[in-house]
Amino acid sequence: MNPPVGLAAFLLVVVATAAVGFYGLRISRTTSDFYVASRTVPPWWNASAIGGEYLSAASFLGVAGLILLSGTDALWFPVGYTAGYLMLLLFVAAPLRRSGAYTIPDFTEARLESTAVRRVTSLVVIAVGWLYIVPQLHGAGLTIRISTGLPSWVGAVAVVLVVFLSVAAGGMRSITFVQAFQYWLKLTALAVPVVFVLLHQGGGAAVPVPEAINPTGLPAAGPYQTVSLLLALLFGTLGLPHVLVRFYTNPDGRSARRTTLIVLGLLSVFYLFPTAAGLLGRMYAPGLARDGRSDALVLLLPGELVGGTAGDVLSALVVAGAFAAFLSTTSGLVVSLAGVISQDLLGGSVRGFRIGALLAAVVPMAFALVTDSLGLAGSVGLVFAFTASTICPVLLLGIWWRGLSDAGAIAGMLTGAVLCGGAMVAGTLLGGATAPGWLAQPAAWTVPAAFAVMVLVSLATKERIPGSVARVMTRLHVPERPLSSER
Amino acid sequence: MTRVRVTAPQSAGRRPAGLLPSGSVSRDAAVDSDVGRLYVRSLIRSQLRLAIAVAAGFLLVLAACGLMVALVPEIAVLRLLGVPLNWLLLGAGLYPVIGLAAWLYNRSAARNEARYRELVDER
């Protein structure tokens, strides 16, 4: 790829993000404060913002790369990423909005009246956030290496620097506008090149059968692997820390549901394109899988199949979209982590928030610099398994079961964290590809274990069920009084 | 089939105003009497039943698609617009199902809430 083109694309995204942020900041200053402003944000903007924050390196680069590697087995990833929002809609969206909680630790503390639960939840949230940022930085490193020829660490450091500066400067008041813009940028950056390549290749007479090509010779995933993966993706989404904050910008529970429906539509449209890119790669560029460049498939596809100036322009567009993905997901995570770290560890001052943002960004950066990516979609899939085994049980049982006690919540979260975290460490030590299936995809046994421990310990400690449970449950589930304008 | 709990209309004495800080009328009515608590419990139960039913239906479709692709290899030979049918099914066909499930859920959940509100307002 043409190095100056890649670099220009990256700078363009940074400048455009700053410009949209500035524009949004001006708008939110005209209203009295952020929360009031959020009520005037139409559901479409809000849904775009949720989509913008959610679509990370794994979706933008990883899905197509994994489809190139493992074919139809990998198609479950985008389906799972999308259906995760269906589960979020069914079990979490409206009650969580009605809880009034701004972060997951806020919710568990309010529901269980326990600061110990809050502390454990905070630790889990910080772990999830760090684990989730690492693949974003791996993706940034890969993109900068492929597009400009610079070493990988430049990409990771650049993303962390941009995110930290914008978060610390307080520019995140306008985050809804920035994130909404990033969704449409990502969609365009993937859709235009894919459609162009499709039209370009459409004239070719001999279309190879994608199944006949297996560039890696990887065996098909067994039923256990697929079920375990889907369990992780379906129930991991509803525990992601940066997702909950976004739901707070809905005025009430009903609009939280409406927004989620739009998010599902936006995600469905988006995932058609990485899927198509993966299929195109499998048919026309299977060589990329053999030399370990599969995660760079969408970056390389225009250059390989179109070439020339058109190829350069399309590549630049994809690079821009990729950086939009790293920046939006990382900044969403850093903001929510900085909030948790500063509130729970540093006393909640503005200075504490900045230190929190620094910790939230620098720790995963150090980790990303000393490790190598083992496939972006796979490593994000493991993070989903971790949230599904820790935060998902406490949210689901907290919202729907009166019998949950603080001791049960803590025991269940710790069980899930130890089992799933242990499986992740053991799987990595055994060396990714050669690890046995039950270690590589732990969700199928760690999620039920966490639920079981949470329920059993709660049943054994009935006297610890908070007295406020009836009041809190009412607040979570009873519809808000309709606004007079709706009547 | 939805079960409906039938209760006689009651005019239980209301608590003095200001005891509950949440300003919503339907919320106040909900907590301040046994009947109110009953209404809330049945609302939560019907919402949970609805969510589980939609989730189960979707998972069933998901499992059926997975089994079909795994057990009927002929499906990979069939093509629509040059794309093998198994790719079309998993890569594009499941999204409308997700959207439909979400839309149905939203409608029914809103209806459950409207029914609850009617019950509370009647008192």
Image (cartoon, coloured by chain):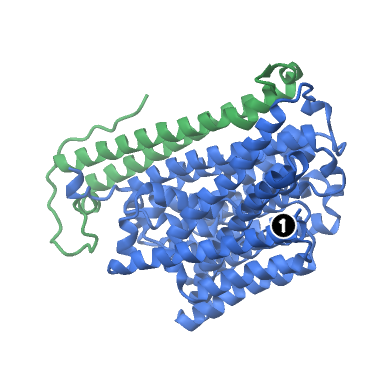
- B30 sits to left or right of A270: left
Q: Amino acid at mark 1?
A: Thr
Is A258 situated above or below A432?
above
Q: Residue at x 68, y 42 (%)?
A: A229
Which residue is denoted by mark 1 in the rendering? A143
State the residue in front, A194 or A115: A194
Q: Which chain is blue?
A: A
- Residue A187 can be seen in this image: yes
The chain under label 1 reads A
> Residue A169 at x, y = what percent?
49, 76
Q: Is residue A306 above or below residue A155?
A: above
Q: Residue at x 86, y 55 (%)?
A: A430
Query: Which quadrant of the figure has residue A349?
Result: bottom left
The chain displayed green equals B
Q: Could you say where residue A443 lies in the image, as x and y percent from the top left?
A: 67, 47
Dividing the picture into quadrants, the one containing residue A198 is top right
**Residue A446 in sight:** no
Front one among A41 and A461:
A41
Figure label count: 1
Q: Quadrant of the C terminus of chain A?
A: top left
Q: Judging from the image, what secondary structure is the residue with disc 1 in?
A: helix
A95, above or below B69, in the image: below
Residue A68 in picture, x, y percent from top left: 76, 39
On the image, the x and y values in percent for residue A171 come to 46, 70
Instruction: Give the residue drawn at x 62%, y 55%.
Output: A320
- Considering depth in this image, is A426 or A166 the residue closer to the camera? A166
Q: Residues within 10 Å of mark 1 (few under 14, many from 20)?
A: many
